[in-house]
Image (cartoon, helix red, strand yellow):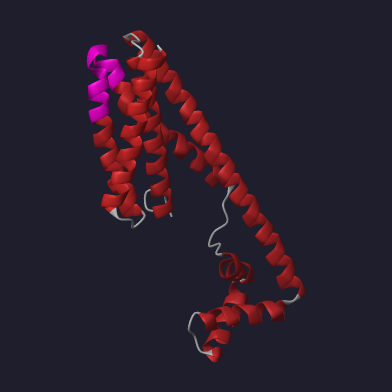
Amino acid sequence: MSALTDPAASRNATLVANDGIIATAGMLEGFAGAGANDATLVTAATVATIAGMITAASAKWVEAVTEREVQLAAVAEERAEIRQQPETELAELAAYYEEKGLSPGLAREVATELMRRSPLKAKLESDHGIVEVMSRLDVARASLASAAAYALGAAIPLSITVAVPVRLEAGVILAAVAASLTVTSIIGARAGHLNVTTTLVRTLAIGIGTIGVSYIAGRLVF
C-alpha cells in the first residue's frame, strides 16, 4: 500500500507537516518579537527547516528500523516453530479462524490450505498481524517521507519570511499557519476516521498557542 493510500502513512505525514508549520512559525514569531531583521529571520527559518527535516527523518528511521527488527525476529520465530511443530502451528491457525467465526471444519480446511501455500505468511498474519515484512527500502522511504512532510509544512512560514516585509510578518504568518493547520487537520482527521471538529480545535489551539508564547517570549527576553 502506498503512502498516498495508507491511512497510517497519511496521518503520520500530516502530523509531521504540522510539526514543521508550528515549530518554524513559533521560532519566527519569537525572533520577530525580539525585533530581528529580514535577513536574520530568513537565516533562522532556513536553518530551523533543515534541522527539523533531519530530526523528523532520523526519528522516523529509528521507528521504522525498530519495527523491521521486531518483524524479522517474528519471522525467525515462526520459521523455527513451523519446522519443529507443524501440526501445532496448523491447530493454532485453525483456532484463529474459528475465533473469527468459521465453523471448526471450515477453519481447519482454510488453515490447511494456507499452511500448504505459505505457512510463514499465514502465521505472521495470524500471530503478529504482519501482512508484509518491511524492507530496507521501506525504511528509507518512510524516513524520506517524514523529511519531505516536515519541509512542506515549514515551507509555509519560510516562504512568508522571504516574501513579506518584517513589519507585516507576525500577522501574516499567524493567518497562514491557521489556514494551513486547518487544511492538514481536516486531511489527517479524515485519514484517521477521527472527529474533524475536535482534531481541528486541538491542532489550532496547540499551533496558535505555541506561536503566541514564542512571540511573547521574544518580546520579554530581548
The range drawn in magenta is: 160-175
Residue drawn at (58%, 56%) of the image: 133
Left or right relative to 52: residue 29: left
**Camera-side residue of 7 and 204:** 204
For the question of whether residue 170 can be seen, the reply is yes
- Residue 179 position in % (x across, y down): 24, 35
Q: Nearer the viewer, residue 218 or 161?
A: 218
Quadrant of the frame with the N terminus: bottom left
Quadrant in the rendering for residue 201? top left
User: The C terminus is located in which quarter?
Assistant: top left
Measured along the vertical axis of the image, is residue 129 above or below residue 62? below
Q: Is residue 33 magenta?
A: no
In this rendering, the answer to whether 8 lies above or below 178 is below
Q: Residue at x 32, y 51 (%)?
A: 189
Above/below status of 105 relative to 201: below
- What residue is shown at x 26% (from left), y 41% (from top)? 182
Q: Where is residue 34? Give x, y as percent.
A: 36, 13
Is 79 left or right of 158, judged from the image as shown?
right
Q: Quadrant of residue 203?
A: top left
The residue closer to the viewer here, 99 or 148, is 99
In this rendered view, identify the residue nearer to me: 113 or 10.
10
